[in-house]
Amino acid sequence: MKFPNAVNGVKKICLAEVLQILAVIMGISLIVVLVANNVKLGAGALNQESAPSAFVSAFGIGASLVGLAAFVLNLLGVMTAQKDDDNFKKAFLFILIGIVCSAVSAVFNSNDGLKRWMDTVSTLSSLFASYFVLSGIASLAGKYPDNATMNLALKARARLVGTFSATVLMQLAAIIFPIQSCTVLSVLCVSIPLMQLVSCMLYMMTLAKCRRMLAKPPRRSDSRLHDRGVSVPEYSALTR
């Protein structure tokens, strides 16, 4: 096994993403129930009082716990994998930045301006952490080499940035242009987590493929080149 730390790290990150997808699905289910109840009652905005309190509480607490477990596993996975590739070190740094910003946001919850900025930086940190995880996968694939895994990682990286940008634009549009229509608001509330779910699925596929790749030994010729410190230019250029 050429990269034992990356193998163990990617396993944890892969499991974390499964939990994250579960948390997103739970969140979507809650939103769908709220939307259905609001439409039925003719309410003009989404609110938790329109749905059964037991359901809201169960799904809210459940999604939070699953999300927390996913975060911890992801953190441990990146900490382990960083020993085999520098991209994971960058990912770990952005995770730490996100933790600090989230803590500041929680402490100064009454300061709307500061809270908004800290939440924005935390979200951006999460994006960059995932970006560098995918860059690390592409880098490891280049050392095997494994064209299919590398290309999938690069596509997932581009899709991640695209999905994040679209989500931010939709959120900004909802803030800048107040929406009175319950139907339009409901579509936006469901579309954003659905886009996140698609991005999570592609991210998960990339992690699973990387996990299978790392379970195999590198090709002998490329392994010798890597041991001598010789990199493949094509992979080095793509994973910068």
Image: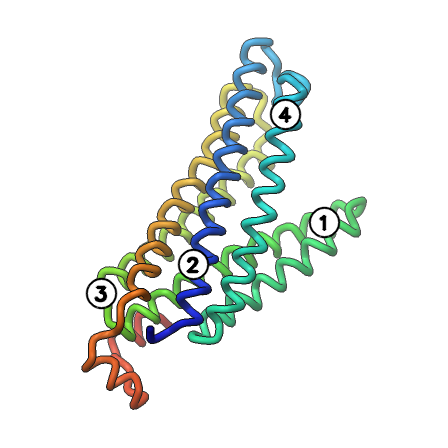
Q: CA distance from mark 2 to mark 4?
A: 32 Å
Q: Helix, strand or loop at disc 4?
A: helix
Structural crowding at the residue carrying mark 4, measured as other residues with C-alpha within 10 Å and reported as few (<14), some (14–19) or many (≥20): some
Q: Badge 3: few (under 14), some or many (20 or more) residues near its Cα, within 10 Å?
A: few
Quick check: 86 left or right of 152? right
Residue 235: horizontal and vertical position, in percent?
28, 73
Mark 1 to mark 4: distance in Å? 25 Å
Q: Percent position (x, y) of residue 231?
A: 29, 82
Q: Which mark is residue 147?
A: 3
Point out the tag, 1 or 3, that comes first from the N-terminus.
Answer: 1
Q: What residue is pinned by disc 2? A: 11
The numbered dot on residue 115 is 1
Dot 1 amino acid type: Lys
Alpha carbon separation for disc pair 3 and 2: 21 Å
Front: mark 1 or 4: 4
Which quarter of the rendered picture does the C terminus lie within? Answer: bottom left
Q: Earlier in the sequence, mark 1 or mark 4?
A: 4
Numbered disc in front, either 2 or 4: 2
Give the labeled residue for mark 4: 56
Q: Residue at x 58, y 37 (%)?
A: 63
What type is the residue that disc 4 sits on? Val
